[in-house]
Image: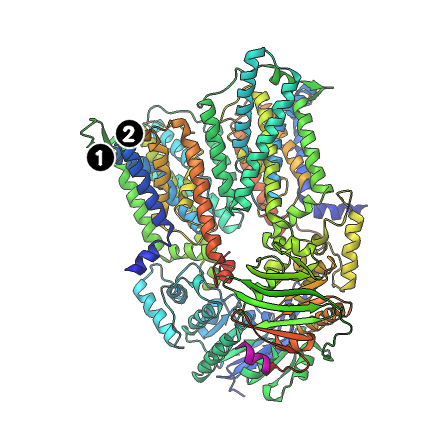
Amino acid sequence: MQNTIKKLFKRTETYIFLILLALSVLIQVRSGQFYTPNNIVDIMSAMIVPGLFAVGAFLVILSGGIDVSFPALASLTAYATTKMFLDMGYEGNVLLPILAAILIGGILGMINGFFVGYLELPAMIVTLGTSSVFKGFMQGTLESRQLAVIPAGMKSFGTSSLFTATNTQSGLSSRLPAAFLVLVLIVLIAFLILKYTMFGRGIYAIGGNEAAAYNAGFRVKRTKFLLYVFAGVVASIAGMIRVCMMQQCHPTNMLGMEMNIIAGVVLGGTVIGGGRGTLTGCILGTLLIVLVENSMILIGVPVVWKDVFVGLLIVIGTAISAYQVTRSGRSKGNRKQTEEVA
Amino acid sequence: MTDYLLRAVEVRKYFAGVKALDGVTLEIRPGEVHCLAGENGCGKSTLIKIISGVYQRDSGTIEFDGKELTKITPISAIMNGIQVIYQDFSVFPNLTVMENLAINSQLVEKRKIVNWKNMRKIAEQAVARIDFKVDLDAQLGELSVAEKQMVAICRALMFNAKLIIMDEPTTALTKKEVKALFKVILQLKEQGISILFVSHKLDEVFEISERFTVFRSGKLIATGDTSELDNQKFTYYMTGREFEVKPFVPAKLTPEPLLEVEKLSLDGFYSDISFSVKGGEILGVTGLLDSGRTELALSLFGMRPVTGGKIKIRGKEVELKDPQTAIANKIGFVPEDRLSEGLFLDQSIGDNIAISVIDELTSRGLMDKARYQGEIDKWVKELSIATPDPGNAASTLSGGNQQRIVLAKWLACKPDVLILNGPTVGVDIGSKYDIHQILQKLAGNGMAVIIISDDLPEILENCSRVMVLKDGRMAGEFGTSEASEKMILDKMM
Amino acid sequence: MAEKLKVSFKKDSHIWRLLIIMVVWFLFMAITKGGKFYSLVNFQTMFSQFPEFGLMSLGVMVCMITGGIDLSTVGIANMTAITVALLMRNAGSESGSLGPQWFLLVFVIAILMGAVTGAFNGILVSKCKIPPILATLGTGQLFTGIGIVMTNGSAISDFPKDYAFLINNKVAGIPVQFILFAIAAAVLVFLLKKTTYGKKITLLGSSQNVARYSGLKVDWILIKTYLISGICSALGGMIMLANYNSARSDYGSNYTLQCILIVVLGGVDPDGGKESITGVLLAIFLVRALETGINRFPQISSYYISLIWGAVLLLVMVLNYFSSHNIHLFKKKA
């Protein structure tokens, strides 16, 4: 028992969880509004898109890469799909558009996967480049502009809800979009992939020691390629859900999200450079960022302070985890091994 | 003559027209420990890669277990029972021991889905074969080097291995761990498994192997029973040179010590260490891997500032809080790991040499290109670093020449005290001899030299005194003229 | 002579590649647009436009040579511009217009702000050992956030026009923006080529650990590097302030990408250990020339520019890949 607790306190997830708890209690004490049914549902709803993005970003970072192109990829896919189905006068349900988006997202992911996996170019630079290409393609070639109307099927998916939670005191009510199930599903799939498939173990193995993974017989290039395709697919689903939930397509308002998503993943204990990190940590870290972004107003902090707090969170969070790494490296006997890991 | 497990005959391999293997032959009997030796670049790793399917041979035949192998791939080599344990063990630090052990078999079976129960069973069986006690759920990165190696050995045994190739397996092990490794090797031998043991440490070759093969410049030089071999012959086979070993005798000492330390300690690593070195002397420091020898060296260079005690340079007390103060006090340091601590591998040879004195090669605060180049040329010549152009990257040179660059970098600072941590690790015998000559000459010119090493012959031949560390404390001090390896070992263990 | 050229071509292949692209582009513009592109006014405009991101690119460059990166440049630039704008607004409202001592003062303040914010980055990277990409990502957000708080998220444009007027001026036909850029670039060239700093950061970028063992003051060199980057960014912000004649926290948001593009294009290795200021200066100019040229074709949406930049970046990376793997697209004669 004591051992379990000790082990628990070695993990970043535990700390993030405690910080989340402390933050929520603080908000509750200051505003009395945190632990209300509608606020919880609001946060769950706000988690859907960032959560999906985070899963993709997490897997890529775990393999030792990084992807900064997912917001541009998602924007392009979502815009292209929505526009296409609008022009077709499509009247069916949301499934076909989602499938189309998955297809487009997969193809765009292949571009990333080809450069990073098969040509072994640095992931950061490649995805910066593709991000720019995707954005330019959307705004230049497709001449994107805001679409105030979206196909009915997408709209009804965006507005359909699992249940509605009402705050008896304030009378405010919030609904949980059906799209939340998609997040749950994707997290579940990611979990199963990581834990029970050789592809998933390959992601860990490549992140830990790429050369050894190759020697052991993992098909490193193909694994990386498929990984970026998967990340592209997840990102495009997120993009579609965002459009459905907003009931309009604003082509550029997802751009710039990459930094906060990556920050959330890293705060959750995923090591930049790969090999270490858990899905739980990734979700908790993202939740922390979402909470700070959405709940500051509840404790009376004006919205304009949002970026300051998120920025501070990233700086302090990463500083603490960096400090932990150096300190454990300094302790006796461990020195050699941490050097090897590094 | 069919009683060989492996017969590689007249194997040739060219790289871009350059001969790497010039018709070499290697024969290994079932259940024998065979030592393959040779200097860097002699072709031994090329042959291993051909046998394990990483490279394809250009000509020659390879027979294994009675049948001829025409085309070898990494997977077919494993299927035939050939396993290689590389120096870095090819393990995953971020995965558990269990997964490290079992993942290969899962891959070989072309599984797509992971069966954890099955993996645990495989892992348990694997460690049971050599009675290796380890927590299967521990992260591999938290194990010691020796334990990692055992994991790699267990993993190799799983595929019905008939031949296990170990590439310099003892490099990072302590003496105790080497003993344990040898025990396991004998165990494997009893199970009928052949071991190809790649090493150029003579004492190990004599201790463990029954037969040996020596390559030089891609050619087979000698092969036979180890019992017929002696030190001198072995060295001659490897290098083609005869070395005359003359123990170091200090010529003239400075009257006062250049470096004195009193009751030095670093919490958790070593304590209460006192010694002094005069100019003209070479002091050896030895001890096991965890004896605190490396930390002591780092402290004297200011990398890990001491937590207690006094350091005096030329009689004046100094505080060495970072490498810059150490350098300012005329202390030079050749670190343990050339690749991660000593050399900027992808930078030029010249920059590597001049970086430690770069601030002196200036005029009015600006870089003086002519003096900079002059300094580089001087050291390249002085240490006869074999390169057509000092502008080439350091990675283009062999281990011995790289170590000369590191030496040059520190000699350029004109140190009074030169500390070398493992000065000839991974350096072939010829260069090793040359480096020893350089060190003896430096001491002869009045420098105080400290060699930290666990290579006892190196210490005995080159030092005038030796200090033995054990568990962070001084366990003994000898003049090397009256010391023997056995005396030192007794104090170390 | 031919031999020398050959050697130089091999050694500085990326610089030659940039020069060739540039020559081709200028020829193409001469054929298609002629005098419309080759006018004094057009070049003056170009030379007044690139200094803002050019300065930031120089900052990103020094960080990338050490193996790091600076994602906070735009944040620093905007925060500096906002501070200076607010300061001038308050001063200007009293006296109507600004005296010359004010121009000196605001530049001193800008340089100080760049130095402090940059040093902060440097301390996070060196002393706290945070990976540069994360540290500067966080501080970038932080600085942007501070800018938002200072302006409440809106633009500040009601400061004395004197400032924009002065910077938008020309001296002997040369835009003031370019003069400022040229001074900063000259200082950097001097630092990198003439002092020991250039060698030190290059070697440090190759391996921090070896640098530490070689007695380099690694932490201090890193702090100095991010400090230089901060100053470059702050100056970039000052020019943005003049060019836009207003300050706002989300200006220039795509400059981060553009700066990295330029630096990689210029031949700096993202993993560190390679210095190439000549290449970077060429790349800065090339990127602007490309954009200005494209703008001369009204039928091409200006949105295509980000597509083209991304594609160029990928192309250069692929070319570098081929040359480093010794794959030649065209067979060489034996």
Counting from the top left corner in percent of width and height, residue C192 is at: 69, 41
Q: Is residue C142 magenta?
A: no
Residue A264 appearing in the image: yes
In this view, the residue in front, B410 or B311, is: B311
Between discs 2 and 1, the one toward the N terminus:
1
Name which quarter of the figure residue B418 lies in: bottom right
- Position of the N terminus of chain A, as image quadrant, is bottom left
Q: Secondary structure at mark 2?
A: helix
Relative vertical location of residue A227 with respect to residue B190 in this rendering, above or below: above
**Residue type at tag 2:** Lys
**Label 2 marks which chain's residue?**
A
Which residue appears at 56% of the width and 44% of the height? C68
Residue bearing the label numbered 2:
A155
Which residue appears at 54% of the width and 37% of the height? C310
Using residue C317 as the reference point, say whether residue A149 is left or right of it.
left
Q: Residue furthest left?
A: A168
Magenta span covers which residues?
B487-493
Nearest to viewer (mark 2 / mark 1): 1
Counting from the top left corner in percent of width and height, residue A4 is at: 31, 58
Counting from the top left corner in percent of width and height, residue B267 is at: 51, 62
Residue C53 appearing in the image: no
Q: Is residue B490 magenta?
A: yes
Counting from the top left corner in percent of width and height, residue A73 is at: 43, 37
**Label 1 marks which chain's residue?**
A
Q: Secondary structure at mark 1?
A: helix
Using residue B485 as the reference point, say whether residue B109 is left or right of it.
left
Residue bearing the label numbered 1:
A37
Relative vertical location of residue A322 with respect to residue B454 in this rendering, above or below: above
State the CA–CA distance, disc 2 to disc 1. 25 Å
**Residue type at tag 1:** Pro
